Each structure stands twice: as C-alpha cells, then as structure tokens.
Image (spheres, helix red, strand yellow):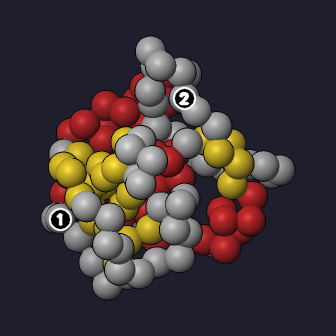
Amino acid sequence: MKHSDLNARFDWTRDSRWWDSWRILRGTGPLTGDCDDYAVTALFIACGQSWLRFWWRLATFQACFWFTRLRSGELHMMVWVRGRGWVDNAHPIWGPRTLPKLFPMPWPVVILKLMMGWAR
C-alpha cells in the first residue's frame, strides 16, 4: 500500500472510550480507524511495510508519535519521521507542522497499544 492509498481510503471513526488500541490498517475497501491508527499505518508505510524498520526507527528516535491538541481542543496523534516531517489524518501530506506538540509517546507504550490492537 502507498501513502496516497491510505489517504484515499481512510475513514475516521472513534475508538471505544475504554479500549483505545492502535492498529495497522490493511485490507481492501475503506480503512477505518482513528488518528492513532492513521499515524501507525503512515509510519509502517514509510518504513516500506517492514516491522524491522518500523521498530528500528522508533528505537533509534528516527520516528516518534506525538500527542497534540486540535484547534477544537481534542487530543490528537501525529507522527514525525526524520527526513519526511510530520503527518496525521488532519494534515495527510508529509511536511512541517505548527500544531503544539504536547508529549511524545515512548516506544514501549507503542508496543503495548499495538498488542491491544492485535487482541481486539
């Protein structure tokens, strides 16, 4: 899958309040998820859909997930990748961002959130 395919097929939907998990969006038809699903899928695509490169970029700080707040005040996830910049479902083109970065998501938490998504 290419990033343009993710953008064309992404359909935003809210996670459950009690079970916020992250998933790599795949398959045919609409790719349904929220901002964190979009962000992890965008990173996975940027890594050539390789789990090894995905974890390597996170572990070596070449990529990082960040929480921000949208203008509406809602908490939101975006991803930064060295050499590409920022991307999220609200701004689906890689590049610079002016939204305030609240706090990064440590990669051990990324592992936990993805494991929760696989259990779903």
Few, some or many residues within 10 Å of mark 2 (<14, 14–19, 20+): some
Instruction: Decide if residue 41 is in sight here.
Output: no
User: Which residue is at a point 66% across and 65% down the rendered structure image?
Assistant: 7
**Numbered badge on residue 15:** 2
Where the C terminus falls, by quadrant?
A: top right
Cα distance in 3D space between marks 1 and 2? 27 Å
Identity of the residue furthest to the right in this view = 29
9 and 99: which one is in front? 99
Which amino acid type corresponds to the residue marked 1 in the rendered image?
Phe
Location of residue 106 (image quadrant): top left
Side of 55 where 73 appears, left or right:
right
Q: Which residue position is annotated with label 1?
A: 61
Side of 32 where 62 appears, left or right:
left
User: Which residue is at a point 36% across and 61% down the rendered structure image?
Assistant: 79
Image spot of residue 30 (x, y percent): 78, 49
Side of 69 where 20 appears, left or right:
right
Location of residue 34 (image quadrant): top right
